[in-house]
Image: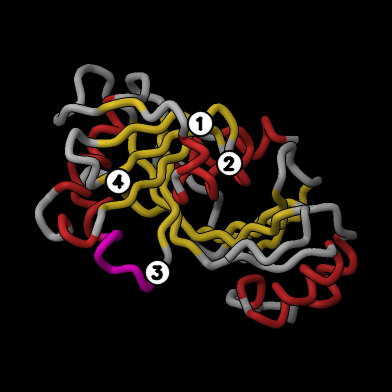
Amino acid sequence: MSERLLRLLEDAAGGVPPPADGVVEVWPAPDGPVDAVLAFTAHHVVAAAVDPDLVAAWLPEGDLGAPMSPGFLGWLGGRLGSRPGSLDVVLAAPGLGGDPPLELWPVEDSARHPRAARAQRYRRDLRVWTDPGGAGVLVLGRGLAGRRELSFEVGPARRNRGLGRLLVAAARHLTPVGEPLFAQVAPGNAASLRVVEAAGFRPLGAEVLFHRDGVDPT
């Protein structure tokens, strides 16, 4: 099932999203630690172990916003024994290969970094770097359906100086040429959205994840 979901995400990243037909699809749960609700333009996918008939009965016909509403997400979390995570904008950009635009040092004991520790709950095959001054951290790994994902963080003293954009740009260079790289950003985090878009990422939809350990993922 993860292969189908990964293909959907990679197609959307390549400019071929699902049709804007108002349909809500229910797919089996993907491999890995999370279930998900994915929103594209007038098209939704619920990837979770839930009865499609129950989903259809809960959602009002013709309400394009209902699959991302607090009511539905709370109901779904109750069915899954989990809690909905944050609503995130999903962006993607193709890998560039080659040398990153700044020097990066690999972090060997990545579990000690809070950003990496959280990423371990959602991603496998983690790789973590920091800049020589230690002001920023970049995390790459395999997340939902095995897609390539990044996260980054910049210390308060170095914000608004371009380091975040360099870290995100570096992630594209650390990704094989042409392979899609995904980023998830909270819609209210305008600063990070600007940074990610400045590094060449483009929005393709939104998502809410449900971690299967039942713990609030926020």
Residue interval drawn in magenta: 188-193
The residue labelled by disc 4 is: 201
Residue 161: horizontal and vertical position, in percent?
9, 54
Question: 138 left or right of 144?
Answer: left
Query: Label 2 belongs to which residue?
Result: 120
Tag 1: amino acid: Leu
- Kindly report the distance in space between the C-alpha atoms of the residues bearing marks 4 and 3: 15 Å
Labels 1 and 4: the sequence-earlier one:
1
For residue 202, side relative to residue 67 (left or right): left
Name the side, left or right, on which 55 lies relative to 21. Answer: right
From the image, tell me which residue sits under label 3: 187
Please report contact status of discs 2 and 1: CB closer than 8 Å, yes or no. yes
Label 1: few (<14), some or many (≥20) within 10 Å?
A: some
Q: Secondary structure at mark 3?
A: loop
Question: Which residue carries the number 1 mark?
Answer: 126
Indicate whether residue 22 is drawn in magenta: no
- Looking at the image, is mark 4 or mark 3 earlier in the sequence? 3
Q: Earlier in the sequence, mark 2 or mark 1?
A: 2
Whole-number angstrom distance, CA of label 2 to CA of label 1 = 7 Å
Q: Which residue lies at the image location 52% right of the left edge and 58% below the top edge?
A: 40
Q: CA distance from mark 2 to mark 4?
A: 23 Å
Depth check, mark 2 against mark 4: the one in front is: 2
The three-letter amino acid code for the residue at tag 2 is Gln
Tags 1 and 4 touching, CB below 8 Å:
no
Upstream in the sequence, badge 3 or badge 1?
Answer: 1
